[in-house]
Amino acid sequence: MGNLAVKLAGLLLLPIITENLSIDEYGSYTLIESFNQILVSILSIKLPIAALRLASSDQHSGQKAWFTHALLMLLAVSAAVGGLVWALKNPLSQLLTGETGNTFLIVLVGASLITEMLGLVPVQYLRLKDRSVSFVSLSLLKLLVLIGMVYWLVEIEKWGIAGVVASFLAGHLAFLLGSLFFLYRQREPYRPNWEAMKSMVNYGYPLVFTSVMTVLLATSDRFIIRHFHEFADIGVYGISAKLAGIVNFVIIQAFFIGYTAIAFRQYEDKVFMNLQPTIIRFISLLAMSAIWFLSLFSEAILEVLSRDSDYVEAYLYIPYFGVIIGFSALQTFLSMTFHFTKQTRKNVPIAATAVTINIVLALILVPIHPIYGALASSALSMMAMLTMTYMNSTRIFYDFAGLGNLIRISAVIVGGAAICVAIIHWEPLENLGYRALALLLMIWLALSILRINAKMVIRTLRSWF
C-alpha cells in the first residue's frame, strides 16, 4: 500500500510535470533520478539492510541499537557527501542538465540524496517489528507532501526541474522525520559499539557492490544515451521506465519488503522452503499480468495523463522493460541464498560481470538506436546475471526455486513480451476491447504453464504476513 501510494503519486502528477517540463527537461530529470539511485546505493554501504539482518539475529533488548549505529555512520557519510556535492557543483550541473551554473538545483539534489539515504534506516526497523500500518501511514504522509509541493512549486511557482527535485526532498524529509519518531518514541540507553559497527560494515559493504552493479544495470544506459544522443531520448526512455517501474514497486518490491524479514527467520523451516517454487510462480504471474496490462493499455493511459504528445511514444517500449523487470525479480529471489548463508561476497563478481556485459553491449548498440539498443543490452546482461546467480546459489545452498520452475517462468516472461509487442503493432487489435480479451487469454495461458495453485499461496502468505 505504501509503495502503491507513492507510485500513484507519480502518475497523478504526470500531467503537471509533463505540462511544465519539456521532453528534454524530463530527460534531465531522469538523469538526476538515476544519479541519486546510484549514489544512495554506494553511500549507504547497505547499513540499513545490515541493521535489519543483524538485529533479526539479536533476540536481546538491544535491537534498536543496531539502527542507531547505522544512523550515526550515515550521518558522517552525509557530511562528506554535502561537501563533495558543493565542491563538484559545476561538473555535476554539466552532466545532469547540459549546462553549468545550476548551483541551486545541485544543492537540492544533494539534500534529497542525503534525506532519502537516512530514511532507509528507520524504515528497516518498521520491517523488523512488522509495523506495516506505520509504514503505510508514513507513505501516505510522503504522498500528500509530494503532491502539495509539486503543485505549488511546479504548477504555480514554475520552478521546473528544481521544483520537482525540491518536492521530492520535502517528501523524503517528511518520511524521515516521521519514521524517526516511530524508532525513538520509546527511548533506550545507547552506547556506541565499535565492534558492532565494524560487523555491520563487514556485512554491508559486499552488498554495496551488488547493489551498485544492479542499479548500474538499470541506469547506466541513460548516461550512455546522454553521450551519444539527446536529452529527449532519455526523456522518452525515462517515461517508459517509470510506467513499467510501477509494477516493480507495487508488486515486486512490496513483496520483498515483507518477504525478506520473514525469510531471514524461516529459511531453516522445510515447510517454508518447500513453498518457494509456488510463491515465485505466483508473484511472477502477478507482476507479468500487470506489465502486460501496461503494455497493451499504456498508449491510452499516456494520452490521458500527458498533455504533451512527445511523451506518448514511450508506450512502445514497456514490453521490453517487462523482460528486464521479470529477470531482475528472479535474480533477487535467488540471491536470497547469499543472505541465508551469509556469503554476500558471492554477489560481487556476478554483478560486476553483468554490468561489464551491459556497458559493453550498450556502447555497441546505443549508437545504433538510443532506446532499443539500451533495452537489448539491459535484458541480455540481466539474463546473464540471473544465470550466474542460479549457478552460484545452488553450489552453496540447495536449488529451492527449481530449474524447471525458472525455465517456465522465463518462458512466460519472454513469450508474454513478444505477444504484447505483436499486439501493439497490429492495427486490427487497436480496439481496447480486443486487447482486454487478449490479456485475459495470456493470463489463462500463463496459469496453465506455471501450474499455479493460487488459493493455497494466498492462504499461506496471509498466515505469515
Image (cartoon, rainbow, N blue to C red):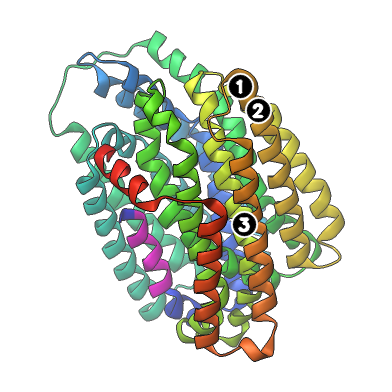
Q: Amino acid at mark 2?
A: Val
Residue behind mark 2: 348
Provide the residue span drawn in magenta. Answer: 3-12
**x then y, percent, for residue 363:** 83, 53
- Please give left or right for residue 69 compared with residue 237 in the image: left
Q: What residue sits 66% from the left and 47% below the top?
A: 217
> Would you place residue 133 above or below residue 239 in this image?
above
Q: Quadrant of residue 238?
A: bottom right
> Would you place residue 177 above or below residue 447 in this image?
above
Q: Amino acid at mark 1?
A: Arg
Q: What residue sits 70% from the left and 46% below the top?
A: 383
- Please give left or right for residue 420 compared with residue 400 in the image: right
Tags 3 and 2 in contact by the CB under 8 Å rule? no
Q: Amino acid at mark 3?
A: Ile
Quadrant of image for the N terminus: bottom left
Disc 1: CA contacts within 10 A as few (<14), some (14-19) or many (>=20):
some
Report the magenta stretch's main SS: helix
Residue behind mark 1: 345
Spatial CA span between label 2 and label 1 = 6 Å
Is disc 3 placed on a helix, strand or loop? helix
**94 drawn magenta:** no
**x then y, percent, for residue 425:** 70, 82
**9 drawn magenta:** yes
